[in-house]
Image (spheres, coloured by chain):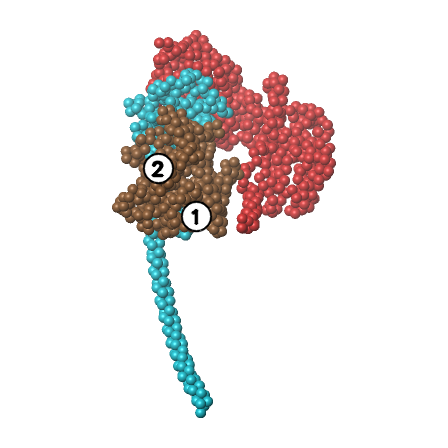
Chain colours: A brown, B red, C cyan
Amino acid sequence: MSVETTAVAKKSLFTPFNIIAGIILVAGLVVTVMRFTGGLGAVTNLDQNNPWGIWIGFDLLCGVALAAGGYTTSAACYLFGLKKYHAGVRPAILTAFLGYALVVFALGYDVGRPWRLPYPIFVQQGTTSLLFEVGLCVMLYLTVLFIEFTPAAFEWLGMKKIRNIIVKMTLALTILGVVLSTLHQSSLGALFTIAPSKLHPLWYSQYLPVFFFVSSIAAGLSMVIFEGTLSHKPMHHLMDEEYLNNHDDLILGFGKAASLVLFGYFSIKVIGLAYDNNWHYLTTGYGAWFLVEMLGFVALPSFLYAIGARDKNLTVIRWAAGLTVLGIIVNRFNISLVAFNYQLPSAQRYFPSWGEITISLFVVTIGVLAFRFISTRMPIFYEHPDYKGEH
Amino acid sequence: MANGKRILRLTAIAITLAGVLGFQLEAMGMLGSTDETAGRPDVIMIDTIARLESLEQPAAVFKHDAHTKALKDQGMSCESCHQKDAKGDLTLTFGRQEDESGAELTASGLKDMYHDNCISCHVKSEEKGFKTGPKVGECRGCHQVRPETADRVPAGMDNMLHFVHWDSKIIPADQGKETNCGACHKKAGEEDSWRFSDLAKTEPLKDVFHSQCVTCHQSLIEKKAERSGPVQCAGCHGAGEIATRNVELAKDLKAMGGTLPRLPRKQPDAVLMAPGAKDKEAEAKAGDKPSGMAPVAFDHKLHEAKSDSCMTCHKDGVNAKLNASFEALHNVNDPATCVGCHVQEQKKPECAGCHEARPATKALSENSCVTCHNVDVTAEPGFRLMASAPVNPAAMSKEEKEAMAAKVIAARPETQAMVAEKDIPEFVNIEALADQYQPSKMPHRKIVLTLMKGMKDNRLAATFHTSPEAVCAGCHHNAPATLTPPKCASCHGKPFETEGRPGLKAAYHGQCMSCHQEMKLEKPAATNCVACHEKKTN
Amino acid sequence: MLRRTFLGLLGAAGASAALATPAKAANKHFGPHPDTHGVLFDATRCIGCRKCEQACNEVNELPEPEKKFDDLSVLDTVRRSDENTFTVVNRYQTAKGPVFRKQQCNHCLEPACASACFVRAFKKQPNGAVTYDASVCVGCRYCMVACPFSVPAYEYNEPLTPRVRKCTMCYPRLQEGKLPGCVEKCPKEALTFGPRAELIRIARKRIETYPDRYVNHIYGEHEMGGTSWMYLSGVPFSEIGMREDLGTASAPELTAGPLAAVPIVVGLWPVLLGGIYAVTQRNAKVANAERVKAVKDALKRAGDEAEKKLHEELGKAEQASQRRIEVEVKKAVEEALAPKEEDAGTKEEES
């Protein structure tokens, strides 16, 4: 029998997915060397007018927003007592943990002196800065996520006692997770409140922190559905009964919630428009793009989610989830790259370079590979037989 | 999909709602920006009914010149819209005569009159194949929510334009006279701008002018005279047309030798202006002691040629008493005052080199008072600005006053008194700060002589630069005028110690460069350092 | 149902929305340090000779540029400061002819860069200069995002020790009592150095003395909360490349609202979430208890019913067996009687 299993495990390493991933990894390593020998200028299209590119716009902003599934799922299960989502907590926590870890990893590329990243917390605290707020909360939250993730590792390693200690802390960790997430999700939006003269009026608002926070809830819910859909087929053999039985319920329930959250988000965006009396911008070019973002990537998925929830149509919900995830990316890109520096002539605007795109792909690939590595070995999609029912 | 029909229905409703909302927003003008077309001079807003009741629709936009041209193209005359009154003159109102005989039209009557006449004409023109205006049902074509605004230059007659009229043979001369003033002005001997006529007291000013000027021009055109004035709005009110006309008139003026012939209205050549004199007429006696500022001898003849229009100074008309308050004659910022106009003269490039650097307040100082207030001035200190002999203008007759003023004016210098050339240093070596550059060898005499050339024929300069050394004070400033002024370094030292007083380096550079800039000299360029001082090689 | 998740989180988010206005300390206004100095730039005096750029380059020991400083053809394009050029002079064509403006850090009274820096690498010094400390800078470039004038420049081509670069108002020279390099070098005294309050007085006096020469506005007096580097101009400021739509709120004022919300969230959220948890637990407990009770009742009812049925059945069975017994007895009796009749029959045959 063991001969069989090893035979199964030894199937070819060179699957199409692995080949593509391998190419991206190699390219990423090459660009990494270029970045640390030639500086940012050798690899990016950043300049004196455009200091932030897709490493901030995508890796940081989208990464943090889409990793919001961790706190939403654990809050749903542990704070709101919705036990049926229990099986989805570990995958969500893993996604979130890897997401945040990779955000920090990607920052190592973007920031000028990555080894000084601990400085704001340990050396000299710039407490007037919202970036300090982001950094502190991300660091703390990453720790929280790590701790929330470790029970799976300890179960895999058979370290029962310490695993039990950590599981007892679940409630406190969950509350702390929601608090920290609220703070850093909103602070990422608040970063841009300091530059009203550089952000197009349709996207600038004093309510940016609220917008970012609410959209992160929708992002988290959608990302759990999205990731669950993507991993369903490849990881099916690992998923236990509890997971499979509750999977459809989870998608349905999250779909309902996401519909409401997106509706709420749409409403506050409309209120934001009215508050600043920005209606006349809607007839401009930027206005048209704003309407595309609002109607196509917020209103439409909200509507689709509602239909899917009512008809119990999981396929529609899945598509809506994909649309929402895309919409979050569009929104974060809009704020950090499209609407930012809108006042500059187009010759001075920024567009990502191949090096930047490579590193972003590189980071995402590492995340996917790490997820695959961990979930195929540790009890993420299934309960460890020694700890069945002990949640 | 199971509920495809319902979704389709909902989507259709949503699209309809969006369409209606968008249409409403657009109609309310909430979307989109205003039209960026520049205003035309002929835009008239028809809101006659506003006098009678509040308007339901916005005022109608009417482009007069466009209609005049359209009528001309179609071979129609002004009488299509403007009726002729009893005298045969065009009335200015549309389709009706505003006199007591016509019944007062009601609001709806006026509305119908406008609508019927305008629209029927549009319909007829379209039938004839011409490009035409809005017709029935195209309300917004005239009643525009965001209408074009009129962009009219205020029309007026200046001396040159007036000359064109009083010199013209087309306008017939008065009975028994050589002048033709009576053709326009009603009271002989008291001719003045129509702004101040009795008619202007009751009618709107535009009606006064239009009824007098435009009707006359129109009748001349109808009589096929050699030349006539404009009848289109743009002809008098359009910036482009005015500019073209001014170019033509300037050519004519040049052909006449540069000066207009003097208007034959029996103006005085010289005027004795005495401050507060007219107030004391009642108590005036020949032997009274002097009090107050000395009178001013005003050269009226010279100033007539220097101004564009009598109204520049006679703001309330030539028949009205001139406002002789201090403010009205001495306000530095108002070009209609004596001091204000002289300050404007100082802005010419020949003058601005020195005068731009002088603060605005310095235009009115004790030293400049006596240049004008000097008729029979006493030499005693403390009484310098006051009249000496018991001359009381209030007790003098008009002829006496004019004679006295003429005498003083005749005594004024024609040209600037000059410093002898030998007293002007030829070169000045400025070496106080020589560091990265060699000392500057300044061609002092050449500069002074160039400045003198610029003010050679200027009576204003000649009158106000009372001593030869006064010109030196242009650069050698903030010290008494003398032929041996102190070095710049006497006052200018380290920078930023007193505001208003630059350090020595900036004093040198600022003084020379600002003068070159104001006098519009291209050489030496301010950034061409070596033009004034060579670089040190080591 | 995640409805509760949504409602709970959004309701609490509403609390932070209410804090969108900056939390001002009850009507107190903190002015700049009394010793704040600044520079007044007079655009009507500048001739575009670029001696200030040269002085800056020398004083800060910056690398030599491609085109020398007396090459005025660089003025044909509008430039900005970069990592090796702390200040540039640009030429603008206006109705009054060419006008020149010097661009450099404006040393704001409440600098956006200092507010934005999360390691406090920027400091507004008491004498007005905004200085940069490269020894703590992480290189995040948020200062470049925050600056409304887009002043800070970055050494993108430095792989391991990149710095943010900008005008320092020659802070070291100021410490020695000297003037900033550009101020000292300008031949026209287009730059005036002095206490900021004094500079404002000077600027007002210049406008009053020469009202035709200047636009009646000191740029930087109030823009972005006020700057130490101020400008006078003879043409509208927008014609010399300066934004007139920046407003008078300083950058710290703009972020004060979101920052103020942070401690509230830290204090309230645990209470809120703990409360939600408690209520959810209570609900679950009550639901559980109800369910247990319901089960118990159901069981009891079922038990009672079963007993009743049993009783009935037993009764019936008892009756049934009784009847059967009777039937059997009857049958037995009949059987017993039947042979007697047969016997009687046979007996008759015999006799």
> In the image, what residue occupies the spot 46% across and 89% down?
C349
Residue marked by disc 2: A101
In the rendered image, which quarter is residue A24 located in? top left
Residue marked by disc 1: A251
Image x and y of residue A225, in percent: 43, 45
Image x and y of residue B433, in percent: 35, 14
Residue A159 to residue C336: above or below: above
Please name the amino acid that badge 2 sits on: Ala
Image x and y of residue A161, in percent: 26, 46
> In the image, what residue occupies the spot 63% across and 17% down?
B255
Res C54 seen here = yes
Please name the amino acid that badge 1 sits on: Ile
Q: Pinpoint the chain carrying mark 1.
A: A
Classify mark 2: helix, strand or loop: helix
User: Would residue C220 be found to the left or right of residue B70 on screen?
Assistant: left
Viewer-nearest residue: C345 or B314: C345
Q: In which quadrant will I find the C terminus of chain B?
A: top left
